[in-house]
Image (spheres, rainbow, N blue to C red):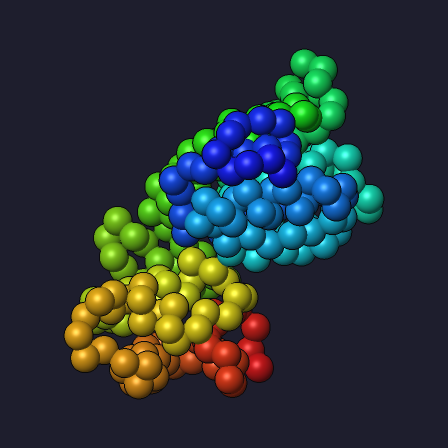
Amino acid sequence: MADHRHAGRVGGHDGLNGGGARVLVVDDEPGVRSALRRGLSAEGMEITLAEEGTEALKLASTGSFDVVVLDVILPGLSGYRVLERLRARGVGTPVLMISAKDGEVDQADGLDLGADGYLVKPFSFLVLAAQVRALARRGETARQDDLHVGDLEIDRSAREVRWAGELVGLSPREYELLVALAEHPETVVTKEELLRAVWGREQGATRNVVEVYIGYLRRKLAAVGAGHVVQTVRGHGYRVGDEQA
């Protein structure tokens, strides 16, 4: 890629402010993957790469990304099919499609399938980065909606948790901890990440307090038959899942 201070085609990019977004980049061209990884990482984003459609669908289906940058022409499943299956599974992660196909019909097809944007190669990295940031912000707003993991339902507006329709009484801290896990179903969240998400910069908060509140949360979920929902991944952290061990 070109100097980070100058906009250009991919690859060349401008050093823009942005950060924290988790982005899945899917493209079968190694040069494009490498350029986007370097450029978006320089914006402070966390980048995961995939080079074919089946792998992309598996990763994106976890719902653990803020934005997916998805090429149309891929080995295995095409970008169109990946997008179609994601939306059919209820995965609402914002998707920015990229393609060398610049026809109006191609762009319309992508948007009709549920894409949130469409860029034609070669594109300005400046424009792509701006769109990724905008989609990440849109995704953050969307995450204020209800969360569902199997029979677990989290109503964010009412700050209520239900399991199979039964209300689960949680303290504010237990609620925030569950939300931090449920935002990324079937994905391991470390104690450090939970500490930052739930306790922030609170003095005196340590990894031990995470363990204590995980215990509180599990006991309350177990009381309604959902003790298996919060799972320990030894040596790594915790995850929320619907399958019983």
Name the residue at the right extreme. 75
Q: Residue at x 64, y 19 (%)?
A: 108
Give the residue at x 55% y 78%. Answer: 244
Q: Is residue 73 left or right of residue 165?
A: right
Quarter occupied by the C terminus: bottom right
154 on left or right of 171: right
Give the quadrant of residue 168: bottom left
From the viewer's side, name the closer residue of 131 and 8.
8
| Residue at (65% x, 52% y) in the render | 49
Q: Is residue 241 above or below residue 64?
A: below
Q: Nearer the viewer, residue 14 or 211?
A: 14
* Residue 69 screen position, x and y as percent: 60, 40
Q: Residue 145 versus residue 119: which sits nearer the camera?
A: 119
Q: Is residue 26 visible?
A: no
Q: Residue 145, position in %: x, y?
A: 36, 46
Residue in front for this viewpoint, 63 or 202: 202
